[in-house]
Image (cartoon, rainbow, N blue to C red):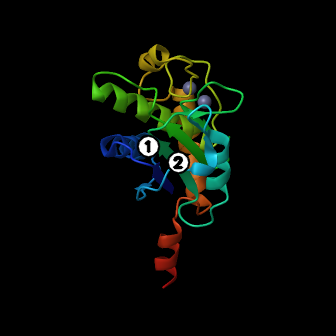
């Protein structure tokens, strides 16, 4: 259902952990794609950052691969109007991108946990969830790392219900079936 796409060199452990958590917590079958080159079209050279909106637009325009696409970068992401973003998605838009650039910590497991939380949060938006007011929930909006660290690695019961309802609907509509699955079913 979801392609996880590393852009440029990304710590392979971070890629696997993000994929495993999306699969376990959202229930979306996640396929790790081979590494692509950095999206030069999105580079804002004066800021040495990548424009998240341009990456989303490019992913959105791709007809190949799974219906949902999540890009992952080691490089810094921003929007022209914002100094930086950890991740960005289109609500219900099936594409998102995240960066592990600012998740710095001496303990790699902390970086991986933060990356997993941001990945799940953005996939939540992709399937149509909005921000949650409850702080004990992955859909709560965290501006800073200490807020992100205080968030649990799960949804509140209301968001959990919404995730499973939306996932069931996607599967019912055939969205959970990848184009590869579809081809093998037709044979
Ligand atoms: Zn959000
Ligand atoms: Zn919630």
Against 78, residue 29 (above or below) is below
To which residue does mark 1 refer? 22
Residue at image position (57%, 67%) is 64
Residue at image position (72%, 28%) is 81
Q: In which quadrant of this rendering is ligand 1 seen?
A: top right
- The single residue placed furthest to the front in the displayed view is 46
Against 94, residue 65 (above or below) is below
Which mark's residue is nearer the viewer, 2 or 1?
A: 2
What is the x, y in percent for residue 152? 42, 22
Q: On the image, which quarter does residue 116 sit in? A: top left
What is the x, y in percent for residue 21? 39, 40
Q: Are marks 2 and 1 in contact (CB under 8 Å)?
A: yes
Q: Foreground: 186 or 102?
A: 102
- Helix, strand or loop at disc 1? helix
Q: Earlier in the sequence, mark 2 or mark 1?
A: 1
* Side of 39 relative to 116 (left or right): right
What is the x, y in percent for residue 100? 44, 34
Residue 93: which disc?
none
- Helix, strand or loop at disc 2? strand
What is the x, y in percent for residue 52? 62, 40
Against 42, residue 85 (above or below) is above
Residue 70: which disc?
2
Residue at image position (56%, 23%) is 140
- The single residue placed furthest to the right in the displayed view is 81
The answer for how far apart the CA atoms under marks 2 and 1 are is 11 Å
Count of numbered labels shown in the rendering: 2
């Amino acid at each position: 259902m979801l392609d996880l796409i590393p852009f440029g060199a990304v710590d392979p452990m971070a890629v696997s952990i993000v994929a495993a958590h999306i699969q376990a917590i959202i229930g979306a079958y996640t396929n790790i794609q081979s590494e692509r080159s950095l999206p030069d079209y999105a580079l804002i050279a004066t800021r040495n950052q990548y424009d998240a909106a341009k990456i989303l637009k490019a992913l959105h325009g791709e007809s190949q691969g799974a219906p949902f696409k999540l890009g992952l970068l080691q490089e810094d992401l921003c929007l022209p109007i914002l100094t930086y973003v950890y991740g960005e998605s289109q609500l219900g838009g099936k594409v998102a991108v995240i960066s592990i650039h600012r998740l710095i910590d001496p303990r790699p497991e902390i970086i991986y946990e933060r990356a997993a939380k941001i990945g799940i949060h953005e996939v939540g938006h992709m399937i149509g969830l909005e921000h949650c007011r409850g702080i004990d929930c992955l859909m709560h909006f965290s501006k800073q790392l200490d807020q992100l660290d205080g968030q649990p690695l799960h949804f509140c019961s209301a968001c959990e219900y919404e995730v499973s309802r939306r996932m069931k609907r996607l599967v019912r509509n055939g969205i959970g079936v990848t184009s590869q699955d579809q081809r093998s079913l037709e044979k």
